[in-house]
Image (spheres, rainbow, N blue to C red):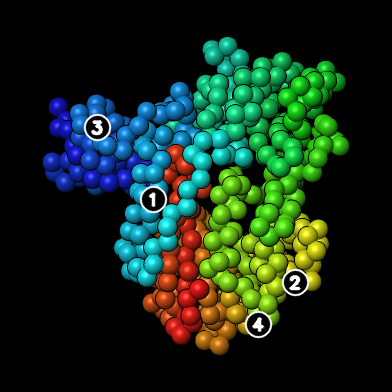
Amino acid sequence: MIAPVCIESLDQEGRGVAHDAEGKVIFIEGALPSEVVTYNAYRKKQNFELAQVGQILRSGFTRVAPQCRHFGICGGCSLQHMDARAQVAAKQRILEDNLRHIGKVEPELVLPAVYGSAWGYRYRARLSVRYVAKKGGVLVGFHERRSSFVADMEACEVMPSRISALIVPLRELVGSLSIRNRVPQIEVSLGEEVDALVLRVLDPLTSRDETLLRIFADKHHIQFFLQPGGQPETAYPFYPENAPELNYTLPEFDIVMPFHPTEFTQINPALNRILVRRALNLLDPQPGERIADLFCGLGNFTLPIARRGAQVIGYEAGASMVRRAGGNARRNGLAHDAQFKEFNLFEADEAWLKGQGHFDKMLIDPPREGAIAVVNSLAIESLMPQRIVYISCNPATLARDAEVLVHEKGYSLKAAGVINMFPHTAHIESIALFEKPGVEKT
């Protein structure tokens, strides 16, 4: 019989961390710090085991009842059993631990964590679709935990209620189509004035299928896009074609940001507004300054920087995204102050950066892989920006890059903190401020 263990902490996947009697590390899904639990291992390695919680012999003070009835089966959330405030505290600890152990740095200031609504926040989602005869029809939802099966869902508490309420009707709709076996995915993309659903269709629709989609769209006040190809760019508006523009807004900066439903935008628009505000406060762009926005996307930070009067250049891989960002700058009257260039920043080096000229400040918002090529390219003292704001979705790569910035490039880590962009998940969004010595802190 396996002896119970005491949970010491959470790891970056939201699993409880414990050690067995021999000292082997056990990562236990569903267990929380300070709890005493039994566990059922589903993967055993020489130095660690992965397990699912069995019995909770002593419950932790942060444990709460999950709000969603599908929690534990659906893989969309991993932390609904933990108090929302405690989730953020755990994420802050993970960020600080990564900076300390991987980056060998500590921020001079730990920024207050940014909170938002813990429910109904998710304005983007990629839902899998599968016809399963044994389940009585079509399933629409996220994958089950540690599985390729689609969870048998009827609601989703982290999506807005109006979209959660569409899951069952969407199951019925797809089940009524002639190509019910050829619709593998529905992408949800919500804007200020319209809710868009992108159907991935592997075969053409019949005229009856098209009629059913139009009836559904009118009844539920959504817009359908169809995506016949493997590339997101193949998605096009199906019905209604005259729907309002899909966009989000940054009212503090008087910016309207149009986007295509398959383009990347933050899934939590309320927290995105706070993130942009914090990033701009830390960066403190001033008129006359020249600033680089790396991994700029549609211009989520570029345009607010330009609105503050600085000259900013956004860099992004992919010509279509650069064109879209430029269009957004023109739409907001910022084409003079915001420019965009196409470049794969994973290939950045000293010669490339030298060719771009001096930047007073820099904002970096990379994907999970981080921005190691960019930070390594900062090799000429006279070309190093005085201030860098680094937004991260992976504390491990942020810590790795922080080590280079601090211990090789001479920057100081002035501040760092978490933005709880994804409540009830283990995803950690964070922001950090780096400065060269002698620069006054904002």
Residue at (47, 33) in percent of width and height: 75
Residue type at mark 4?
A: Gly
Residue type at mark 2?
A: Asp
3D distance between C-alphas at marks 4 and 1: 37 Å
Q: Which residue is mark 3?
A: 59
Q: Is residue 293 left or right of residue 2?
A: right
Residue at (35, 68) in percent of width and height: 106
Question: Badge 1 local density, few (<14 within 10 Å), some, or many (20+)?
Answer: many
Residue type at mark 1?
A: Lys
Task: Give SS at disc 2.
Answer: loop
How many labels sit on residues?
A: 4
* The image quarter in which residue 182 lies: top right
The residue closer to the viewer here, 152 or 231, is 152
Q: Which residue is mark 4?
A: 357
CB under 8 Å between discs 1 and 3:
no
Question: Badge 2 local density, few (<14 within 10 Å), some, or many (20+)?
Answer: some
* The image quarter in which residue 102 lies: bottom left
* The image quarter in which residue 230 lies: top right
Q: Which residue is mark 2?
A: 337
Q: In this view of the protein, can residue 183 be seen by the observer?
A: yes
CB under 8 Å between discs 2 and 3:
no
Residue type at mark 3?
A: Ser
Residue 296 rendering spot, x and y as whole percentages: 64, 62
Q: Which badge, 4 or 3, comes first in the chain's sequence?
A: 3
3D distance between C-alphas at marks 4 and 3: 57 Å
Q: Which residue is mark 1?
A: 91
